Amino acid sequence: MFKAKFKATIVTVLLFIGLVGLCSVRAMGGPQSSAAQAEPAKETWRKEFDDVCSKTQDAMTFSQEELTDLIRRCDALLPQIEKLDESLKKVYMERLRKCRGLYVYVLDAKRNEKK
Amino acid sequence: MNKKIFIALALILVFCGSALSQTGVKKKRPLPYEYGRVIIDNYSDKADLAPVVFEHWIHRSMFTCRVCHVDVGFAMKAGATGITAADNARGYYCGSCHNGKRVVDGKTVFQACSRKVNLEDEKRCLRCHSYGQKVASDFDFFKFSEPLPKERFGNGVDWEKSEELGLIKPASFLEGASTSKGNAFVVQKDFALNPKVEGMPDIIFSHRKHTVWNGCELCHPDIFMGVKRGTVKYSMVDISQGKSCGACHTTVAFPLTDCQRCHSKPVV
């Protein structure tokens, strides 16, 4: 009886230690993995920015639906750019503002044409 | 008698009042090499450095307006960008080109700002932080402008013709900053704008000419926000104060004194 209890306690303690170990490994690896994730994330926002804002020269040819979609994509980029470092944020917030502003402007012009 | 004195005093007051109410003093017309010059003094003073002297003429001969004011992100008003040395050192704003690595015309472009500065760097700092300093530039305006077609005002250079003749080749793409080459714009046809003053020639506005260097988002909607032609009224007073056309045509592009460049439709 005592032996069985002792065994159960040891197993529980071992399990607890294992669990703590796992958690600490995860916690220690946390920042590293998030930093590793940040790099591709940075790439992703830049690719999306380049894709969305490289179309400004064709803004006049887009339909209202296409322009609305581009504006939506600009809005989706904003929170990602807000998280960037100071210089990047300053540059790309302004670039995004200009790019989005143009799409909104052309969309307004197209809506106005139809009236 | 008292009435006469009163009238005379009133006239003097009215005359002096109107004379004093004229705001400011007459602006000195900049010399050709000064036209487009921007003095940037956001943080220089705090860093114990002279303000930065930026010459538009040399930069505009190498890049279109769009590259710097859209792709690199410089604001359209002097001092409005809030450039810091850290921004430049990280490779943004001036540091987009002035990074000590980029090669232009076979020359390595000097680095604008760096994180660590020693005494030897002082000369490099002075290349930009040169306001009020005696600094010899690498570029001589008169030598540079000598072969270019002439104009009467501004820099005294016909920039448009200079490009047409292939004498300058402003790049429309900057590696690392630009998202597109920006050279195939779909724009409205040229149109005429009727001035308020009778007998004044109509303004022929060319979107094509403007988009070649500026793109679309440089002007719309920040400078020109009206979506329907004719809804926004423009006045020469507003323009001379830097609004609408004046955003560029009082600072860098040919100035307002060159009336015929815009009011170009022959009066029938």
Image (tube, coloured by chain):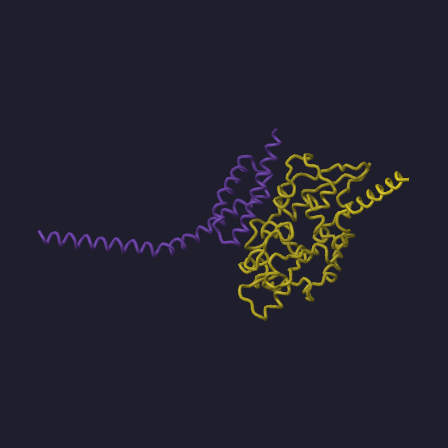
Q: Colour of chain B?
A: yellow
At 86% from the left and 40% from the top, the residue drawn is B6
Residue at the extreme left: A1
- The picture's colour for chain A is purple
Q: Relative to A84, does residue B188 appear above or below in the rendering?
A: above
Tell me where residue B11 sits by quadrant. top right
Say left or right for B13 vs B58. Answer: right
| Residue B226 rendering spot, x and y as whole percentages | 65, 37
Residue B264 % position (x, y): 77, 42
| Rendering coords of residue B165 (x, y %) | 72, 53
Comparing B19 with A57, the one in front is: B19
Residue pushed farthest top? Answer: A115
In front: A32, or B86?
A: B86
Residue B132 image offset from top left, x and y in percent:
69, 63
Quarter of image, res A64: top right
Quadrant containing the C terminus of chain A is top right
